[in-house]
């Protein structure tokens, strides 16, 4: 499946949000540096706008080019970073904005990569016992983002709902002698 996904054309693009209003987002397309505007209300009402609308963030946008609307958008800046699905055992995942992914204190599977392709998220992983000498041996599953904001990420993955939260930042404490 890895090769099939690698060969699938992607209609989505990465863009940086430079402004927005009640019904439109204004972005600079990363690849071409071209500016564009898209209405996002329909995506928002359909639950297809994943993440906070925030200036300066990067989004993967699947447009409906004929109507100049957003079909699906994911705030990849907000998705990036460490997320924990089991705080007691400190188990979680780390998303790299470039597509890398890693497990934190993995129990059953090790996450390797993530990809947004035509608005859909795919997660590449290996079982703990599996040896994968190259990425074409990774297992791949489609994941569904049901919620994304600065504090919470909820995804459906392998038939299960994963509720992830950001780690609490504890202040460093100095104990002098």
Image: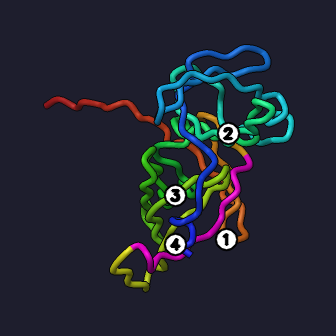
> Main SS type for the magenta part?
strand
Mark 2 or mark 1, which has the lower sequence index?
Answer: 2
Alpha carbons under labels 4 and 3: distance apart: 11 Å
Q: Nearer the viewer, residue 77 or 71?
A: 71
As helix, strand or loop, the secondary structure at mark 4 comes to: helix
Alpha carbons under labels 2 and 1: distance apart: 22 Å
Per the rendering, the mark at residue 71 is none
Q: Nearer the viewer, residue 58 or 90?
A: 58
Which residues make up the magenta segment? 135-146
* Rendered location of residue 38, percent (x, y): 72, 26
Q: Residue at x 65, y 65 (%)?
A: 142
Q: Which residue is mark 3?
A: 114
* Rendered location of residue 20, percent (x, y): 67, 16
Q: Which residue is mark 2?
A: 73
Q: Residue at x 49, y 70 (%)?
A: 125
Per the rendering, the mark at residue 158 is 1
Mark 4: few, some, or many residues within 10 Å (few <14, many ≥20)? Answer: some
Quadrant in which residue 97 is drawn: top left
Alpha carbons under labels 3 and 1: distance apart: 14 Å
């Amino acid at each position: 499946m890895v090769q099939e996904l690698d060969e699938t054309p992607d209609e989505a693009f990465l863009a940086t949000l430079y402004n927005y209003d009640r019904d439109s987002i204004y972005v600079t397309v990363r690849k071409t540096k071209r500016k564009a505007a898209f209405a996002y209300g329909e995506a928002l009402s359909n639950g297809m706008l994943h993440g906070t609308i925030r200036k300066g963030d990067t989004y993967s946008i699947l447009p409906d080019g004929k109507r100049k609307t957003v079909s699906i958008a994911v705030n990849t800046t907000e998705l990036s970073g460490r997320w924990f699905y089991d705080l007691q055992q400190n188990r979680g995942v780390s998303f790299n904005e470039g597509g890398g992914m890693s497990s934190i204190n993995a129990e059953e599977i090790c996450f390797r990569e993530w990809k947004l392709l035509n608005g859909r998220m795919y997660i590449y992983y290996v079982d703990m016992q599996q040896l994968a000498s190259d990425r074409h041996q990774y297992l791949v599953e489609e994941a569904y983002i049901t919620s994304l904001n600065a504090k919470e990420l909820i995804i459906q993955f392998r038939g299960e709902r994963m509720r992830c939260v950001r780690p609490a930042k504890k202040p460093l404490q100095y104990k002098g002698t």
